[in-house]
Image: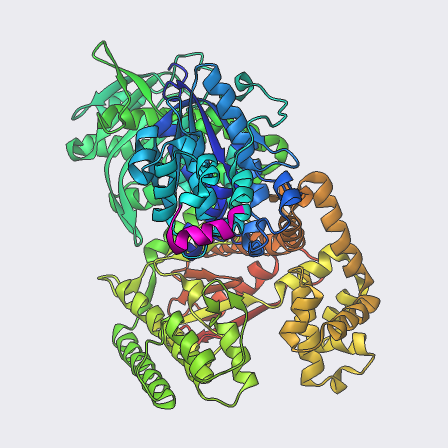
Amino acid sequence: MPKTEATPARDCLMLLDGHSLAYRAFYALKDANLVTTDGQHTEAVYGFTSMLVNLLRDERPSNVAVCFDRSEPTFRHESYEAYKANRQETPEDFRGQMSLIFEMLDTLRIPRLSVAGYEADDLIATLATRAAAQGMDVLIVSGDRDNLQLVSDKVTVLMTRRGISDMTRFTPEEVEAKYGLTPAQYPDFAALRGDPSDNLPSIPGVGEKTAAKWIREFGSLDELVRRVDEVKGKAGERLREHLGQVIQNRQLTELRRDVPLDVEIEDLRRGPFDREGVHKLLDTLQFRGELRDRLFKVLGTPDAEPAADGGFEVELTVLGPDEVADWLAKLPEGRAGLAVQGSWGSGTGRVDALAIATPGDAAAYLDMTTLTPADQRALHDWLADENRPKAVHDAKGPLLALWAHGLDLRGLTCDTALAAYLALPGQASFPLEDLVLRYLHRELRATAETNGQAALFDDPAEDVAENLAVRARAVRELADALEAYLEPRGGIRLLREVELPLQRVLAEMERTGIAADRDYLVKLEAEFAAAVKQAVEEAHRVVGEQFNLGSTKQLQEILFVRLGLPKTKKIKTGYTTDADALAWLATQTDHELPVILLRHRDQTKLRTTVEGLIKEIGDDGRIHTTFNQTRAATGRLSSEKPNLQNIPIRTAEGRRIRQGFTVGEGYETLLTADYSQIELRIMAHLSGDESLIAAFESGHDFHAATAARVFDLPPEQVDGELRARIKAMNYGLAYGLSDFGLAGQLNIPVAEARALKEEYFEEFGGVRDYLEAVVAQARKDGYTETILGRRRYLPDLTSDNRQRREMAERMALNAPIQGSAADIIKIAMLHVTEALREEGMRSRMLLQVHDELVFEVAPGELDRLREIVIARMGGAYKLRVPLEVSIGVGRTWEDAGH
């Protein structure tokens, strides 16, 4: 396959006003609340990158540069002290994103320019003038109308209007059509009009129409000044009164075209970009596939070498009836790539077709609707053969679909999605097309040979058979590349001994599902709906009028204007009314409304959760959630449709939802098992702190025991408050809890929280030393590791951006502990499943939520299952302190709680 190129560029220099466009992107997407799981806001960088990609796609410039303002004063500030003095302080959420925008431009190899003492517009004017003099077309992209003075036959301005995609193209004709002025007259007009955004005052009573009329009448500002006495009326009087100010405005609005720049126009020519750097940054920012796909489609793969074989060539055979057995029998030794076409979800699926790519260039396409019984048997035997190694992409769904057809999939030595996840666990998603581009440096397009005819399939949908065969071959090659990447990083063992076997266990759990009591859940939903309605009525009563409890604007008006309650944190639209703010208000006032609003939100969330569960009950009366192995960077599992981790368990009302999950027909009861304080036990193990280990071995309540050590009291004298303080400390330290955060949790002054932390570390010095060492080592290595060697890469540990660096430090503290807990629960799931299979038991594992496992117990197997679960979970990994397993039994999930 030939090297993929971006759309051919035209001879044009595109200049972008960096800060102007970044601000525009930030405010356009502010309400989208784009925040990574680590708390980094990304609205500006996402919008800016999206805008940049669209411009590169639509305008196809040969040369590009992005110009930025500097923080130092410019020559304009020196001549007019109040220049831009009215600008509001840069929002913190925006400031933290500028370094990310710089990093994005650097990885795209797009020059970013700034010069002390000058604004971005001056750099743009200088470069535009140079390029036009060389005969090159220039396109300026900005939200600043001062750039309209640069418009000419060679220079066009794209002016942002609303959002990040609505722009107006200004040529000389368009400037004249809009303002009735030539571009050369525009700065004269701007001087008369003034500019509030730059704090350039206007003439009182003189608007844009009058200013434009004067310039048209007199031809220029110089001529207007020379003949100023000819201007009649009050407007003329005001003009004469403010003439000095107008002249100063004119000096300030004139863009400099002689900025000393150390780059030439040729230096701005587009070239190869850092593909791997872009991938890593997009992973860090957790931007999902759409922007990534669009970016690479526009930029192509300029740094990728053509494949030696010319691309993903396949010698395709479309197998007809009774041809499957013979073709499979002739397969050469070695790993085959497998691609499945169909649909799956809710514990089942359907296979329409599949393709098998051999270790050579041959590939076969099988239409499942044409298989004869002999074909079905041959395919079954080959798929189930442990000795025929196979590679599949994201295999859990296809496995469920194959099971629905009476087929099985064994001999799986690589799942390319799981392998990619272990290679870069911070990535948001793992589409095959992206991985092929990243690791094989090719795009998933193909040259296929059918009946001796060669065809290039630029559109993957053009021919199903060839496309699926090419995907199978890509999977086979990708598996080799990913294994080569993982091998020196210790990831192969995790893949083959943990993640691949676990994938099969999770598929079985999804297929089995858990029984749900529909009637109970429907009644519960009605109760929560009634509670929501009651809260609405109470809120209307105490306020004395009806209003929308879900409207932030209306709540702000009622809380802070009508009722005059204390102001909360200032946000863009006023004062925040989030749950934390309402809880704070409830402590600051005797008014009923904050408490009612909190109850309304709680009941609304409960109702929404139950509604979602009811929708997911299948025809078999069971809920079949989908478990995700590749979502959490720490290695934890998550679930969706429904998200079982969203079911609240801290309140009595929330726990009532678990009452709707029941034991199924033919089974005796449910059994739940979870680890007691597993993350703290792991911290004791990793830190080796003798005092912490002794607290676990003391036989006392762990939090009371640690509190006794900190406060030098017998454990029986530790009251609830002291225990709560140390419990917050115990868990908080593993998550990088700051003094401020601890103070907020305990509702105590920051100084008191700091003192408590110091007392804690006096007793548990090994914990302090471990926490300091783990961050230092991660900064040196660039990653953290769990007890099984699961890595989490943290490049931001060396970032110049304080916010990003501190987030990375918190992740470095938490990842080894939470990731090790994830490793242990996965090993436990494998060991318990193996024991149940070895003993031929009917009892089965249904759910995994956080550190808890839920089992459905067959009649007569309860005692043995309890023994197996305690033994296998407790022995999953040998720590310096024992793993303690708690067991509960009951007919519902809630009854089985403990």
- Quarter of the image with the N terminus is top left
Residue 599 in sight in this render: yes
Relative vertical location of residue 117 with respect to residue 560 in this rendering, above or below: above
The overriding secondary structure of the stretch rendered in magenta is: helix
- Give the residue at x 33% y 82%: 536
Q: Nearer the viewer, residue 310 or 355?
A: 310
The percent position of residue 895, horizontal first and vertical second, equals 43, 78
683 lies left or right of 218: right
Q: Nearer the viewer, residue 374 or 509?
A: 509
Residue 794 highlighted magenta (yes or no): no
The percent position of residue 729, horizontal first and vertical second, equals 69, 69
Relative vertical location of residue 890 with respect to residue 717 in this rendering, above or below: above
The percent position of residue 60, horizontal first and vertical second, equals 38, 24
The image quadrant of residue 371 is top left
Q: Which residues are magenta?
A: 231-243
Residue 634 in sight in this render: no
Relative vertical location of residue 185 with respect to residue 512 in this rendering, above or below: above
